[in-house]
Image (spheres, rainbow, N blue to C red):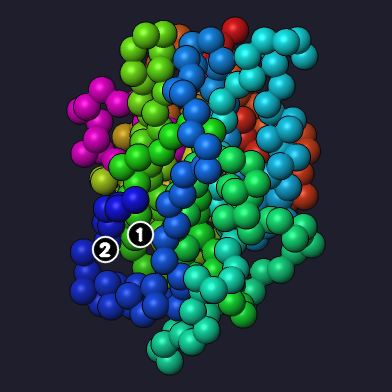
């Protein structure tokens, strides 16, 4: 599947990002082996999650098992799920052995992880759609970046290179397809991971400018990500995105990371009438971040 690529404007940033791009494998856009009819999400409901999985330490399959149960544990429809993932990792032959001499790769992050935590393996084993764009090397023959995993079809995939601070950061955007009753339904979804250095508000502002260009069409938007806001929701990085796509305040400000930090956010233009509540999970499912879970449609 072809996809669009949006990059930084400054020539120096483009050159540096290009070198880092050569140190990682290509973006991966994959459909499941077995295609299913488009479900009616007004009946099944939809769960949207943003989650930093700590380089594969997070157990995505266990989270899915926790989320994909019929309402009240009965025999009703199983909800559809869209996961906006940060710090996904990939290993194997797609990752180049050599890297440019101008690139000083970041230190690898290797948490305790299962053998099947590679994001491509997760997509294959769960039968989900995948859009994965690596940002940087993760030591050896691994790279890491942001991803969208979805039980619903993905299209119009795009990579968004953010302004340079200390590392290459690339957000991934895709359109989710489903039905609402007899009518087609679409959602534009973005997974983003901002730098943990001061200046990340510049990255947030760049993302907000790009997303603002889509505000005039009728497709609702959801943005999920680890914004690395050590000072919490009052940081300028949150405000920059909130001005374009409103933060889902029903998700609250409880800690999503250790030290009582709130780093992870959902922003959406989905109307309040279809939103069924949001929570920050009590279980981190093996990651160092806790998932933020928004339910829409359904009962």
From the image, tell me which residue sits under label 2: 8
Compared across the picture, whether 135 is left or right of 47 comes to left
Task: Please report the residue visible at 61 percent of the width from the left and 30 percent of the height from the top.
Answer: 293
Q: Mark 2 and mark 1 in contact? Answer it, CB < 8 Å.
A: yes
Q: In the picture shown, does residue 260 fall above or below 68?
A: below
Q: Is residue 290 visible?
A: no
**Neighbour class for label 2 at 10 Å: few (<14), some, many (≥20)?**
some
Give the x, y percent position of residue 203. 37, 56
Image quadrant occupied by the C terminus: top right
Q: Earlier in the sequence, mark 2 or mark 1?
A: 2
Let me know if residue 221 is in the magenta part.
yes
Give the x, y percent position of residue 108. 64, 74
**Neighbour class for label 1 at 10 Å: few (<14), some, many (≥20)?**
many
Q: Secondary structure at mark 1?
A: loop
Q: Secondary structure at mark 2?
A: loop
Task: Please report the residue visible at 35 percent of the width from the left and 26 percent of the height from the top.
Answer: 186
Q: In the picture shown, does residue 175 fall above or below 163?
A: above
Provide the residue span drawn in magenta. Answer: 211-223
Res. 120 image quadrant: bottom right
Res. 138 image quadrant: bottom right
Let me know if residue 243 is in the magenta part.
no
> Which residue lies most toward the bottom here?
101
Q: Nearer the viewer, residue 153 or 111?
A: 153
Compared across the picture, whether 138 is left or right of 41 comes to right
Q: Nearer the viewer, residue 7 or 194?
A: 7
Please tell me the numbered disc located at residue 162: 1
Compared across the picture, whether 99 is left or right of 158 comes to right
Q: In the picture shown, does residue 38 fall above or below 28?
A: above
Give the x, y percent position of residue 189. 41, 37
Task: Please report the residue visible at 71 percent of the width from the left and 37 percent of the height from the top.
Answer: 63
Main secondary structure along the magenta-highlighted residues: loop
């Amino acid at each position: 599947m072809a996809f669009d690529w949006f990059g930084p404007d400054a020539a120096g940033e483009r050159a540096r990002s290009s070198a880092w791009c050569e140190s990682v494998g290509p973006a991966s856009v994959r459909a499941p082996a077995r295609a299913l009819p488009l479900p009616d999400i007004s009946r099944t409901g939809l769960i949207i999650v943003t989650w930093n999985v700590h380089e594969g330490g997070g157990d995505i399959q266990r989270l899915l098992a926790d989320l994909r149960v019929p309402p009240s544990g009965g025999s009703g429809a199983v909800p559809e799920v869209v996961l906006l993932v940060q710090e996904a990792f990939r290993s194997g032959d797609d990752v180049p052995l050599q890297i440019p001499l101008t690139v000083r790769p970041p230190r690898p992050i290797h948490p305790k992880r299962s053998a099947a935590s590679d994001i491509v393996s997760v997509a294959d084993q769960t039968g989900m759609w995948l859009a994965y764009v690596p940002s940087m090397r993760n030591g050896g023959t691994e790279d890491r970046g942001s991803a969208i995993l979805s039980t619903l079809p993905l299209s119009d995939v795009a990579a968004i290179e953010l302004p340079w601070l200390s590392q290459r950061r690339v957000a991934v955007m895709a359109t989710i397809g489903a039905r609402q009753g007899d009518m087609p339904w679409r959602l534009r979804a973005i997974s983003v991971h901002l730098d943990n250095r001061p200046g990340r508000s510049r990255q947030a502002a760049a993302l907000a400018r790009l997303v603002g260009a889509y505000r005039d069409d009728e497709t609702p938007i959801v943005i999920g990500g680890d914004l690395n806001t050590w000072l919490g929701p009052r940081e300028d990085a949150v405000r920059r995105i909130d001005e374009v796509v409103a933060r889902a305040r029903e998700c609250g400000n409880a800690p999503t990371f250790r030290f009582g930090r709130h780093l992870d956010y959902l922003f959406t233009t989905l109307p309040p009438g279809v939103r069924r509540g949001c929570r920050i999970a009590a279980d981190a499912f093996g990651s160092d971040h806790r998932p933020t879970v928004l339910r829409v449609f359904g009962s």
